[in-house]
Amino acid sequence: MTDKQTLRRDIKARIAALSPEDRRAQSEQLCDRLASHPAISAAKSIGIFLPLPDEPDLTPFYTRLAQPLALPVEENGVWVFREITDLRFRGSENHGIRLPKLGKPVPAADLDVILVPGRAFTPEGHRLGRGKGIYDRLLLNTRALTLGIAFDIQLLPALPQEPHDLMMHDVLR
């Protein structure tokens, strides 16, 4: 099995090779799959992510949701969820991502579903992130159902695992 850094580099290259049309089509399919996922309709609150350029864009799906949404942001070196009070982007950035208007902090333990990006996933729910452990720390004390979100090429049969790596409850692609 390949080490994590090599896998991250390989997956990044695979994603870069996807055409904009493929990325858009797969993002739209993911939006449809999420809209019909039973956990979404049952959720009272949902943790979301805003996509980096090489991640699936679920923004059209978010605009359909009636539940309160929360977004992870870095504040003083610590990642926390904050409620989204207005999904329209206001121009400020956090790690290169334009942010919507944010409100009060939301403990991860109070969220019912959290959508999680990653570099790669296995069908069983193992996740390879970007290497900074952000989601491993964010999700440590949550009871939320975690849904890994990926393009088709990000699903691999196996990934190297370490004790701190958290598993997803489900992976959608």
Image (cartoon, rainbow, N blue to C red):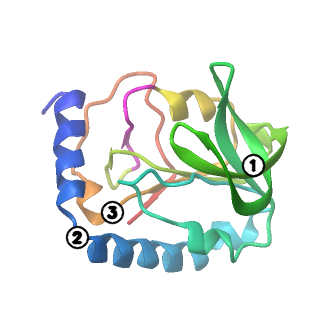
Circle 3 residues within 10 Å: few <14, some 14–19, many ≥20: many
Q: Residue at x 50, y 76 (%)?
A: 33
Query: Is mark 1 in CB contact (under 8 Å) with mark 2?
Result: no
Give 155 or 29, whichever is nearer the viewer.
29
Above or below: residue 127 compared with residue 30: above
Where is residue 23? Give x, y as percent. 33, 69
The span shown in magenta is: 125-132
Give the secondary structure at mark 1: loop
- Residue labelled with disc 1: 111
Query: Which mark sits nearer the N-terminus, 3 or 1?
Result: 1
In the image, is 100 to the left or to the right of 119?
right
Q: What distance separates the C-alpha of mark 1 from that of mark 2?
A: 34 Å
Q: Nearer the viewer, residue 21 or 119?
A: 21
Residue 130 is situated, as x and y percent measured from the top left of the image, at 37, 35
Q: Closer to the camera: disc 1 or disc 2?
A: 2
Circle 2 residues within 10 Å: few <14, some 14–19, many ≥20: few
Picture layout, residue 162 above or below residue 13: above
**What residue lies at 44% left-to-right and 50% top-to-bottom?**
52
Residue 107: in magenta span: no
What amino acid type should be assigned to the residue bearing mark 2? Answer: Ser
Name the residue beneath numbered marker 3.
151
User: Which disc is residue 19 wearing?
Assistant: 2
- Within the magenta stretch, is there residue 130? yes
Q: Are marks 3 and 1 in contact (CB under 8 Å)?
A: no
Give me the C-alpha separation between circle 3 and circle 2.
Answer: 12 Å
Residue 133: x %, y % from top left: 47, 26
In the rendered view, tell whether residue 76 sits above or below residue 46. Answer: above
Mark 1 is surrounded, within 10 Å at the Cα level, by few (under 14), some (14 to 19) or many (20 or more) other residues, namely: many
Q: Nearer the viewer, mark 3 or mark 1?
A: 3
Looking at numbered disc 3 in the image, what kind of residue is underneath it?
Phe
- Residue 143 in the image, given as x and y percentages of width and height: 70, 42
